[in-house]
Amino acid sequence: MQLTASAPTLEDQAQPAAPTKIVLAGKLFDPYTLELLDNQAITICNDSGMILDVSPLSAISSNFASFDGEVIDLRHLTVLPGFVDTHVHLFLHPYAETSWVDQVTKESIVERTIKATVHAKRTLMAGFTAVRDLGTEGAGDADIALRKCLSSPGALIPGPRYFCVTRAIAPTGTYGPKSSLYVNKEGIDDVTGVDVADGTQECIKAVRRQIGAGADWIKVIVTSHYAVRSRASEVSRRVGAASMATFDYDELRAMICTAHAYGVKVAAHATNRSTIIPLISLGVDSIEHAYDMFAPDSTVVEMFEEYAGHKTKYVPTLAAYYTMTQGKGEIWDRAANSFKAALELDLDNISCGGDTGVFAHGANALELSLMVRLGADWKKVLRWATLGGWEGFIADLIATPGNFAADFEGAVSAESIQFVMKGGKIYKRDGLPLV
Ligand SMILES: [Zn+2]
């Protein structure tokens, strides 16, 4: 068989694409002023995916007749910047399906990576156009390759903008999984949930190595997640469950200073005042969880009084506590009361990160809903869920038919998100995925 190529005819040659497209918004949420603006037109550069202009529709409607680019009519919807979930784990799936230990020790990196690609698409379709992944939890550095597949110019698969850390850093003995046969050995079958480092030199080295490997952020475990002395629970629940600091001050300072010297920010898993306040003084960029109001030396209000005035973001991860406890009991009460204390002090440096992965990817908006249920102003929550996570002029836009004031949870739920655009490209329209 002979293959012949004919010269393109004039009709075959594509018309030069218009340089811009326009999104018409019935309402547009402005996260800076917290206003809902009526009838706006957003002009987007097709080449760069950047927003070039936002104007009242009336001001530009006279030019429409001559506009030959695409017009996306969302006048029946409310348009807002894409949501940002600042605390996800794309390599985890709900603990209600499989426990953390079983995921880390019984699911291969191949299986976990394939699942992560599915989670990425669900996240984007729920209107979350950017996420920060705070650790692969035993899946090594697979997030770096996932980032390439999601976010490079020739992206293979749909998903949000993806900022990742490779592995969280924690000292010896403080994190899982823990072997029941080899009690003095780190991890199981050479799988560790974190990157283990001890002493300032190893801490500096771990940070440099991770940045060299491509990490966007550094994540440090500052209050033990797996209680350091969890093995003691075989004989004493009180000792076994005790939450305690992991790194010492010099180790924390070494990691934060090293990361900052390279222009890389640091997220800290920390729960109580005695670990949080030193971190803030060291200029850490975000505190994850901060839920323990029964710190021995102060109340949670005192903790947030010291927190106020600092730029460090507070990421309360309410959704993780809520889903793990069904919203009942002491742990949930602590998390809820900590968030309420922050609201009472009018803390505004909050971002929305649910620890998504502990519960289902795609249900990310649960964090926003819980904040409103606990008394936060919905407009502030929309600011925390957008500007609170990532700021830019790129056209990451979503749209919902919902009414935030009347039914906030309905308006932000994944089912309500009718339209998703990332970098000027449409991924979901009329409620249907295009990819
Ligand atoms: Zn987490």
Image (cartoon, helix red, strand yellow):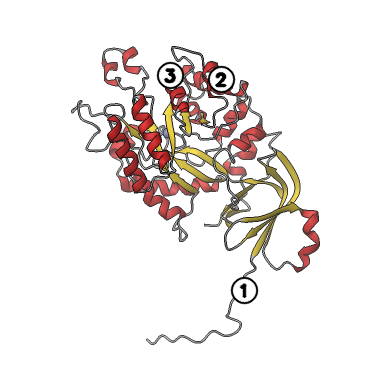
- Pointers 3 and 2 in contact (C-beta within 8 Å): no
Sooner in the amino-acid sequence: mark 1 or mark 2: 1
- Which circle marks residue 274 in the picture? 3
Quarter-of-image position of residue 19: bottom right
| Residue 349 percent location from the top left of the image | 57, 31
Residue name at image x 67 percent, y 63 percent: 70
Amino acid under label 2? Glu
Task: In this rendered view, identify the residue nearer to me: 201 or 8.
Answer: 201
Amino acid under label 1? Pro
Helix, strand or loop status at disc 1: loop
Location of residue 373 with respect to 357 vertically, above or below: above
In front of the other: label 1 or label 2?
Answer: 2
Task: In this rendered view, identify the residue nearer to me: 223 or 155.
Answer: 223
The residues bearing labels 1 and 2 have C-alpha atoms spaced at a distance of: 58 Å
| Residue 431 percent location from the top left of the image | 61, 50
- Which circle marks residue 16 in the picture? 1
Task: Please tell me how many numbered marks the rendered image carries.
Answer: 3
Q: Quadrant of ligand 1?
A: top left
Location of residue 111 with respect to 157 vertically, above or below: above
**Residue denoted by label 2:** 305
Residue name at image x 65 percent, y 39 percent: 411
Helix, strand or loop status at disc 3: helix
Amino acid under label 3? Ser
